[in-house]
Amino acid sequence: MSEESPEPSGGAVEQGAGRHDWEVPWIEAIGAGRPERARLAAEFGEGFRKTNSLMQLMGQAAADRIGLNATDLNCLNILSFSGEMTAGDLARETGLTTASITGVADRLEEAGYVRRERDPKDRRRVVIRLVLQRALRDVAPVFLPLVQSWQGVVARYTDDELRLIVEFYGQMEQVIRDHLVRLRGPAGPGSPAGPGNPAGPGNPARPGNPAGPDTPPGQADR
């Protein structure tokens, strides 16, 4: 960088004593006409990234404490919202293949967290059902301190403020779902990764698991 660097554009931000000399796209998306708006936009984007990273780290730490791998714990969490799902539904929700979900269900069933049952309304369907007592015994206590801390934060806000926060979460959930679909689809023109490529969106690589989430059970996450 030359000694006389140009002033940052609307997408570059100053933070503390240092300066980010790269463009941060969410600033322009939010609207960075005023310096205060640009600062808030930068803090919004960085806050989201930090929270997302910490949630992933906490999920791994919780999985280690419980004795599951992170993928299995995430599937168990998704299953807990409805209490039961078919393997196909869980595969669609997570982006894993049905073969991978079979491995997840095998491990969770062996550990006592789920059981497979025939759907009484359609005997051809097999559902993966959460064993609530086991989850309450082994999983809930790990997250209870976090939930109690959340409750302390929630108590600081009015009902109207909480409604706004809940609405925001709903909108962000849909945004993330839309982009999960995009990332799981075929790579765009010129992309170095694509379906069939171990690093492509059809089988994304992860640190410690270069072959992606479809690696056979026992060779990934643990």
Image (tube, helix red, strand yellow):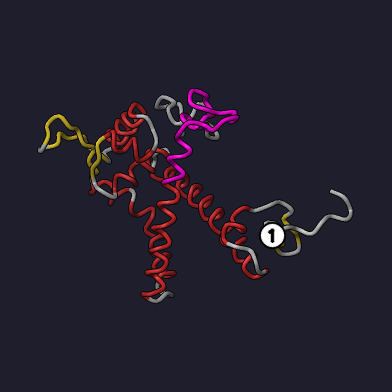
The residue at 88%/56% (across/down) is: 4
Amino acid type of the residue tagged 1 in the rendering? Gly
* Prevailing secondary structure of the magenta residues: loop
Q: Position of residue 180 (x, y in %)?
A: 44, 42
The residue furthest right is 3
Q: Where is residue 221 in the image (x, y as percent from the top left)?
A: 46, 34
Residue 104 vs residue 167, the one in the foreground: 167
Please say whether residue 190 is one of the residues in the magenta stretch.
yes
Q: Where is residue 126 in the image (x, y as percent from the top left)?
A: 19, 32
The residue at 60%/62% (across/down) is: 31
Q: Position of residue 93 (x, y in %)?
A: 35, 40
Q: How many labels does the image show?
A: 1
Quarter of the rendering containing residue 161:
bottom left
Residue 211 vs residue 132, the one in the foreground: 211
Quarter of the rendering containing residue 199:
top right
Which quadrant, please, contains the C terminus?
top left
**Label 1: which secondary element:** loop
What residue is shown with label 1?
Answer: 10
Residue 82 vs residue 117, the one in the foreground: 82
The residue at 39%/36% (across/down) is: 95
Left/right of residue 67 with respect to residue 51 in the rendered view: left
Left/right of residue 102 with respect to residue 12 in the rendered view: left
Give the magenta-colored segment's residue range.
178-205
Please say whether residue 125 is one of the residues in the magenta stretch.
no
